[in-house]
Amino acid sequence: MTGCVTCLTRACDGKEGKRLVSILEVSDLAVEFNTIEGVVHAVNGVSFSLDSRETLGIVGESGSGKSVSMMSLLRLIPEPPGRIRSGSAWFDSSKGRVDLLSLSKTKRAAVRGRDIGFVFQDPMSSLNPLMTVGEQIAESMRLHLELGDREARTRTVELLDRVGIPAAAERYGNYPHQFSGGMRQRVMIAIAIACGPKLLIADEPTTALDVTVQAQILDLVKSLRDELGLAVIWISHDLGVVAGLADRVIVMYGGLVAECASVDELYEQPRHPYTEGLLEALPRVDQDRGEELRSIEGTPPDLYTAPGACPFAPRCSYTFDRCRREVPPRYVVNNGHDTACFYDLAERRPRSE
Amino acid sequence: MSNESAVDVRPLVKVEGLKQHFPITRGVIFSRVVGAVKAVDGISFEIFRGETLGLVGESGCGKSTTGRSILQLYRPTAGSVQFDGNELTELDRDELGAIRPRIQMVFQDSYSSLNPRHSVGKIIAEPMVIDGGYARGEMNRRVAELLELVGLNPKHRARFPHEFSGGQRQRIGIARALALNPDFIVCDEPISALDVSIQAQVVNLLQRLQNELGLTYLFIAHDLSMVRHISTRVAVMYLGRVMELADNADLFNEPLHPYTQSLISAVPLPDPKAERERRPILLKGDLPSPSNPPRGCVFHTRCPLAQAVCSEEVPAYREVRPGHWAACHFVE
Amino acid sequence: MTSEQPQPASGPDLSPSADPLLEDERGRVRRALSYGAKLLLRDKGGMIGLSLFMVVVFAAIFAPYIALHNPLQQDLTRSRQPPAWRDGGSWEYPLGTDSLGRDMFSRIVYGSRVSLTVGFLGVAIALSIGLVLGLVAGFAGGRVDNVIMGGANLFLAVPYLLIVVVVAAVVGRSLVNVVLIFGITDAPLFVRITRGEVLRIRNSGYVESAVAIGAGRARILFDHILPNLVGPLITVATFEMSAMIFYEAGLGFLGLSVPPTIPSWGNMLAAGRQYLASTPWVATYPGFAIIFTALGMNLFGDWLRDVLDPRLRRKGR
């Protein structure tokens, strides 16, 4: 859709002053699903880069393509019906720079377990119910790090202890169903970091948890991230969680990147009407109740048609005719801040080329 | 709704010592009771006309069960539930049927709570069919009126639930609840399955309807921000008990109970600057099982302030300040 | 009841003569049909299944008009004549003749009657018994449930073949016996499925919400549970029908089904077995008939399951 996206996302530096090396560069990723009712255009050209030690928050509602785009990076979507239509994802693996999307199956598996760790929303479905949690952690270390049985076991107990599981040595032999939801998520985190990855991708890992348990898990992730120097991609619909965790945030809508900015700038000066609307739709626990929340009218797009216009146009209060004719490119509005909108929110008028 | 002086002093709903225990049975043919899940274990509160009582707590705290017990969807194990002077726990099926039109419920899962084989028109008309005495034309008009009231197109009445989005389905559930002009609606997590931009739509709708129709709500939720936004007063539950109950502003500005304090502190704020300042009070461990709750204060196993007395004596649920109730040994 | 005119301007737009509540119901059927047709066009399996199924039903109903000869007409001079396209065959007997010189094609056409009778009536009996007992077990719960399910499990433990042999020996071979035995031995399956579905639906959100608006037991049973049982039960019924057709043929092959005088695919298979090496058509054509019928019904059942589950439909556009 627009040629300058890659160079533009490179400019998105999260931490000022420091020279950072990008470890992941995704450009023009497009994913679709073939269903009985037609083709679902889930992701329609997503580009971004991620620096080492950076935490990138991906925010969006269900159907925005936030999960599908990240899961398809490691081909974790079912294919078919899913299909990666285009794109590349260059990643600094331990065996050199590789394009994740064109890797062979075996090489991909190596990257998946070793260089990139995953945490999902529902740990119960990603843990094997018939295998002890200790074995599940040790297995990946034996496989990827070629550790012996005894060493893998010692490291596993250390890991379980590190992620905050009490009496780690005794719980090595427990099965997943013997853990609570929060503890299972800790086990998932232990598996994800077992082989010393550079990148952790977390897909709504705290959504199913209660708020007090969520606070525990967020605390753990933050300390592990700083300790291990991890880059993190944190997918969430919760703007609060992302505000506290991310350095930089991408807001997705209708399978496209709506806005990308550093966390402070995004929350203070949103430059996309959707971001602005989302922030105003949120009540806050630390502020008194107002009379009415600002709501975004209408419903999300159904994605059955390939985007030929701004996907947010039908719900946007700034829409003018151009929004219904063209897909907006990502306009750079500030250093490291871009928005895919024809309307200039700061100037309160349509953008001139 | 926000006008406190207009609130009727007589409570519309009065819950006293409500207990809802579910037996745990073993064996198939010769089953025997081996224990009980104490989902709700002796709670009391009042709901005044025109107000919204927010009921918050984490999963398994018994907040949804409380809503269902008030509606008599479960028959309470003990305690009393009074609705406008009627003792609901003593009514039989027919007597309850007579009072049902005045008490309705909006469910969390709008997908499963609407029969997939019924058209929207049929779903919304069902309460009228059950209540009886409505002419067909009258029902048709009312259905169209209700659809419009909740912001849906009356022409879509012949469609089926799966043809609507989550937010629209929740509107259908609200229209059904409004069909018989109720006084009181139990909203059981009505927005927690919805996307953020849609949550605001539904909450605004609920508030508008409350103002227009003079409704009273019990708003059950785990999202504290939304509870703060919508409630007049708020009750906090933990393991089947009410830990604290107070006026909205009092509860959020000056939470007295250590559980309420940690709960509020744990909510992430959509503001990076405030987030850097926020220091959540992290609780130890996990929620104990409601089938085997801790002795003494149910919260003592995770409480940062717990002393020896907490594991022995159940703290009294008392009015610490006017209108501000709490159950903790150390609240002054 | 429709005398009231819709309110002017402010009122919603309703045409005066239409009764929307009734229209809702009609619309429902219309939509289901159009969706079914749409799905059928996309689903080749469903299309093939439906076609095969229609062919067999058509053959059974109009057998006297389709058959070229009397299926019982013997002519020993034409014993085991090959099919028309082989040397020595003639179009008078398109699929050849059997050892007694009877026309294979006509016998296969008439044989479909036995198969379909067993399939339809057997399933009808099993479904009726299963639906009633399953509803009672699922709805009543407690001891009634335990007794019914205990009985069903006990019944499932008795091999049906044993019952067939005993009945054939004691009462004799007849179509009625086969239908009754199949219907009764298959009933426990329907009891279990019905009960399971009832329990699932009873715990569903929409039944809970019906209770919350004051719906009585009868309303919940007839308005909420039964309509949602139709899909899963009809689907299982098609699969069971194809299974019964299969089993009937198997019994016929063993000489335990209908008397040998009645043309049935199983009997034909049994009769042709000894000539498999020299004149294979005598056994293979009835075999093909069995396979295509069963295949057709299974494909049809798969398609039906998709059509009947409204949740599999995407948002209407």
Image (cartoon, rainbow, N blue to C red):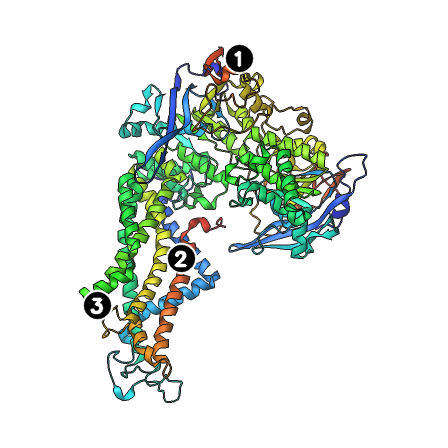
Pick the front one: A350 or C271? C271
On screen, residue A306 above or below B310: below
Pick the front one: A105 or A81? A105
Residue tagged 3: C173
Q: Amino acid at mark 3?
A: Arg
Q: Amino acid at mark 1?
A: Val
Numbered disc 1: secondary structure: loop
Residue tagged 2: C304
Answer left or right for A127 relative to A336. Answer: left
* Rendering coords of residue A123 (x, y %): 55, 41
Numbered disc 3: secondary structure: loop
Q: State which chain disc 3 sits on.
A: C
Pick the front one: B129 or B20? B20
Residue B292, can we see it?
yes
* Rendering coords of residue A227 (x, y %): 71, 34
Residue tagged 1: B331
Residue B196, can we see it?
no
| Residue B295 falls in image quadrant | top left
The Cα–Cα distance between marks 1 and 3, rounded to whole angstroms, is 86 Å
* Rendering coords of residue B192 (x, y %): 51, 34
Same chain check for tags 2 and 1: no
Say the numbered circle drawn on residue C152. none
Q: State which chain disc 2 sits on.
A: C
Q: Amino acid at mark 2?
A: Leu
| Residue B278 falls in image quadrant | top right
